[in-house]
Every structure is written in C-alpha cells, then in structure tokens.
Image: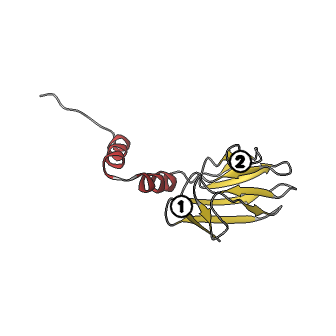
Amino acid sequence: MVGVVRSQANLLTYAIDRFANDYEKDLIVSTLNILPSAVSAAGTNQTTATPLPSQVSVVTVCVSGAGVIATMPYHKLYNRTANPLLFYPSSGAQFETYGTNSPVVVASGGIVELLTTSQKQGWLG
C-alpha cells in the first residue's frame, strides 16, 4: 500500500490555494504572520516604498519623505523615528476617503492601525 503523507502545513496551504480567493488568501496568511518586524522606510512614492513584512511593524529608520506600503489586510504600524512617515495603500486601493493610491502621514512617535474590508478599501484607526 502506497500512501502520501502530508504535513498539516501542506494541507492548509493546499486548501487555501484550492478554495480561497486572493483577498481571502491574504487575510489568512496575514493572520498567521503576527511577529513584529523592524522596518526601514525607503522610497518617496507608492512604487518605491518599503513593503511591510508583517502585521505589526516598527519603523526605526525614516528619512524625510520616505514611506512604507501595506501588503496585508491588517497592519499595526509604529513610527519610532524623528520624521513623519508616509503610509501607502496597496496599488489601486485607498485609505478612508483620501483617494486611490494616496498615502497618509504617520507622525513621529505615532501609531496607526489598518483594517481592509476589500482589496480596494482600507480603514484607519
């Protein structure tokens, strides 16, 4: 008798790939990625901004005009630099009603939370 043994992680990955749409996949993956990351902000526009690697990120380096970009349906972002930080939505999305692809400014020492309700709409808290 020949059988295939799969780990629980492989089964979960298979189920996610087989049955979830892209937005649901992002939500599931971001839920599993909760360890905080230290981030250096870079880039001066949405295309060159530093992608956030986890749900909780602490920006420790940010020159004037630099930014980060959302990569998951939920983020908690801490700006622990002396400069304001630009926080961009994913391409084609918007935060609140600020306009598609428009960043928000996170003040020095500030904290912001992002929760998306679709691939195109995010809400800040």
Q: Residue at x 45, y 56 (%)?
A: 23
Can you tell which quarter of the image residue 13 is in?
top left
| Mark with earlier residue (1, 2) | 2
Q: Is label 1 in contact with label 2 (beta carbons under 8 Å)?
A: no
Where 111 falls versus 1 (above or below)? below
Q: Is residue 102 left or right of residue 24?
A: right
The CA distance from mark 1 to mark 2 is 26 Å
Can you tell which quarter of the image residue 17 is in?
top left
The secondary element bearing badge 1 is classed as loop
Neighbours of disc 1 within 10 Å: few (<14), some (14-19), many (20+): some
State the image coordinates of residue 64 (x, y, percent, origin top left): 86, 51
Q: Is residue 23 left or right of residue 64?
A: left
For label 2, the residue is: 38
Amino acid type, residue under disc 1 in the picture: Lys
Q: Which mark is residue 120?
A: 1
Where 121 falls versus 17 (above or below)? below
Q: Residue at x 64, y 49 (%)?
A: 52
The secondary element bearing badge 2 is classed as strand
Q: Is residue 44 left or right of residue 121?
A: right
State the image coordinates of residue 80 (x, y, percent, origin top left): 80, 56
Amino acid type, residue under disc 2 in the picture: Ala
Q: Is residue 20 left or right of residue 103?
A: left
